[in-house]
Amino acid sequence: MARGKASIKSYENQQKRAAYAFILPNFIIFTTFFLIPAVYGVIYSFYKHDGWSKPKFIGWNNYKAILADPVFWKVLQQTFVYAIVSVPLVFAVSLLLAMLLTQDGIKGRGLMRASIYWPTMISTVIVGLMWRWIFGENFGIINYLIQLFGGTSVPWLTSDFFAKATVIVATVWSKAGFFMIIFIGGLESIPTSYYEAATIDGASKLRQFWNITLPLLKPTSFLVFVLSIINAFKEYPLVLTLTGGGPGDSTTYIVQYIYETGFIRFKMGFASAASMIMFVILAILTLVQFKIGRGGEV
């Protein structure tokens, strides 16, 4: 009996060691590249630090300077506008694509899914350069076609309005495929018997969508909203390669502001404080989404 217990204990210890061995690489990567930099970010946000000389403790002065900086507020406002416009568009387009590509009888459905998902597998830098090539004012394909039919070229990347619109179009194109796959998983988990019963009761397709699809997609929709808002707030390589943050600073968003403050103007403490403010904003938005997504329970 005692020998049996010792054998079970030995087996459990082996299972634990195997589990720790699998977790260890991810733990090391997370600690090295996420946890330690985050801790240093919090510490440096209270220091005056240029990245070279000895840091000097200045308390909350970095935060006070950021809140008094009109450029920060402008960039933050532009980031919110970008998120408010792009997130619903990405959500609607990815949901629509998912619903279309889960319908029975569509030929080449697998190929279409792969084609739409493809942009998410290539580098965001390449996506930005590609859209710059399409919407370039003097050499872009779109303007070439417009001029070919007698029109005048459009300042896609040199006008405030068109530059912002172009960034949003490129964002939707590059992100919709990823969220479409998530929605497809959610749609395919809904039992078909619900739709069969609704059809027998005479419910229209629109009524089935509102009364069955949307309520049962609530957890998936919540995940898509959280991820897409985080993506919107940390968008940087796409914008940098497409517009460079211009014209002027009309498409400069919060991450570019933090990067240029820290690594071009060498105000590491200031940039760290801006990062902490961005973290707090994202945490608040996520908590609000949790509250809405769970019917008031946080």
Image (tube, rainbow, N blue to C red):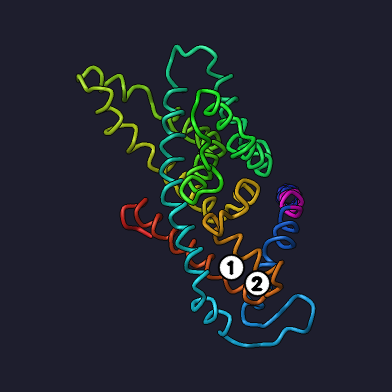
At which x and y percent is residue 61? Answer: 57, 85
Whether 96 is drawn above or below 91: the answer is above
Give the residue at x 56% y 58%: 248
Secondary element at tag 2: helix
Is disc 2 surrounded by few (<14), some (14 to 19) or many (20+) residues within 10 Å? some
Closest to the observer: 183 or 16? 183
> Would you name the residue on which mark 2 appears?
41
Q: Residue furthest left?
A: 202
At which x and y percent is residue 212? Answer: 30, 32
Q: Amino acid at mark 1?
A: Ser
Whether 90 is drawn above or below 37: the answer is above
Give the residue at x 76% y 53%: 25
Secondary element at tag 1: helix
At which x and y percent is residue 19? Answer: 71, 50
Q: Nearer the viewer, mark 2 or mark 1?
A: 1
Q: Main secondary structure of the magenta part?
A: helix
> Would you name the residue on which mark 1 appears?
275
Instruction: Tell me where the magenta segment starts and ends, as one range.
Output: 17-25
Is disc 1 surrounded by few (<14), some (14 to 19) or many (20+) residues within 10 Å? many
Left or right: 298, with 270 as reference point? left
Give the residue at x 43% y 59%: 285
Left or right: 240, with 17 as reference point? left
